[in-house]
Image (cartoon, rainbow, N blue to C red):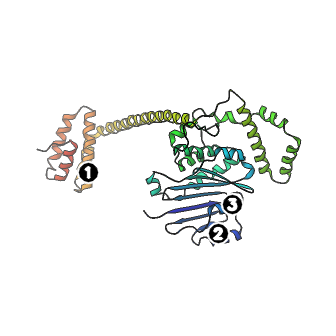
Amino acid sequence: MSEYQYYEFLAIDRPLTSEETSALRKLSTRAQITPVSFTNEYNWGDFKGDPDKLMQQYFDAHVYVANWMTAIFMVRLPIEALSKEMAKALAVNYTLDFKAVQTHWIITWSLEESENYDRFGMENGRDWMARLAPVRDELLRGDIRSLYIGWLASVTAEMPGDDEMEPLLLSGLGNLTSSQQALAQFLEVDPDILAGAGMGSPDLKDGELSQKQMDQWINGLPQDEMKAVMKQILEGRGQQAERTVRNRFMAWQHSLKKGNAKAPRQRTVGELRKNAKIAEKIRLEQEKNNREQREIQRRKEREAYLKNLSKDFPSAWKSVRQTVKRGSGLAYDQGCSALVDMHEAYSLVGSQKRFQQDLNKFMTSHMQRKALIQRLVKTGVWKER
């Protein structure tokens, strides 16, 4: 298998300057570079740039895929978008990494090993950025389920022991967004483990802002914090102010849940794995039901087709004669398939004896066609004489 590497970077918050695109061009003469993106594929050689440094300097999202079964997704977030406590709780070696650099977080989801040889044997990397990039916007809005998915990838890899606790219990794990589902697929999170994590996770609506909680929190804010937020807004840093307020509010909500005995508790990895077994059983049963329903539908469609065929057998025989007359192997295959259908159609209307009579009459003109006879014998429609 030849070497393959795919690099894609995306600038979201601001376009690149002409000086920056010139600097990037020095790293690769073959890359596709625009004011908002950098894309390159390698079938030999390697990229001269450092993705980590490029993320710090220029870009907000990065996808890397190599056919030695490595897949990496990175995003850059403003430092106030995520608390240090949250990053520490969710970080896991080899799977989810958080790096703080002055004004930003660089978050990296990694798949370093895979047994999906088919996927990486034909992986081209090009569709992933469009599917994964919305994760960054979700994080900026305070939706951290994608970070939990990164931790859950370590459970798929059987890294944490059964007695370890999940980092936190999030709402909405049973109803992920399309980009979060794509991230789970990108990291090859076991679908049953993912479904198991959704069991017992509160509905997303239970985690939404309530007017009562907002009023309670705002009323308790110190005046200097209120002034700091207002200054950010007046200075044109409204997005930063919103992220700051949301993070502080979420931290306050989290502290309330910790002190609430009735709140859903965090689960052990062992409990998540038991849930995965239940999810697997449900999935297999659903797949069985789906197969049965598809078979029922197939039979209905087949029966309707045969009934329609039985309405005009003379035309059907005429069509078979014209097909077989071509004398090619393909024509014999098509003619044989048509005769099998006609045999079933005759049986459906209770005329098996008539079919045999019509078939004998048909065959009197084609007994020299050995290839056709061999095909019909194999189907059981005709017996050698």
- Tell me the distance, in whole angstroms, between the alpha carbons under discs 3 and 1: 63 Å
Q: Position of residue 38 (x, y in %)?
A: 62, 64
Q: Secondary structure at mark 2?
A: helix
Query: Which element type, helix, strand or loop, lies under badge 1?
Result: helix
- Of mark 2 and mark 1, the one earlier in the sequence is 2
Q: Left or right? Give the position of 50 relative to 41.
A: right
Please indicate, yes or no, whether residue 209 appears anywhere in the rendered image.
Answer: no
Say which residue appears at 68% left-offset and 26% top-offset.
Answer: 262
Relative to the observer, which residue lies in front, 243 or 33? 243
Q: Residue furthest left?
A: 385
Tell me the kind of residue under disc 2: Leu
Task: Estimate the x, y position of residue 152 in percent, counting from the top left.
Answer: 57, 43
Q: Which class describes the residues within 10 Å of circle 3: few (<14), some (14-19), or many (20+)?
A: some
In the rendered structure, are the residues bearing label 2 and label 1 in contact, judged by CB atoms less than 8 Å apart?
no
- The amino acid type, in three-letter code, at marker 1 is Asp
Residue 336 spot, x, y in % from top left:
24, 47
Q: Residues within 10 Å of mark 1 (few under 14, many from 20)?
A: some
Between tags 2 and 1, which lies in front? 2
Residue depicted at 54% across the width and 43% down the height: 155
| Mark 2 touches mark 3? (CB < 8 Å) | no
Are there few (<14), some (14-19), or many (20+) residues within 10 Å of tag 2?
A: some
Tell me if label 3 and label 1 are in contact, CB under 8 Å.
no
- Residue beneath disc 2: 24
Q: Residue at x 70, y 48 (%)?
A: 140
Q: Mark 3 highlights which residue? A: 56
Q: Quadrant of the N terminus?
A: bottom left
| Numbered tag placed on residue 333 in the rendering | 1
Gap between marks 2 and 1 measured at Cα: 59 Å
Viewer-side label of 2, 3: 3
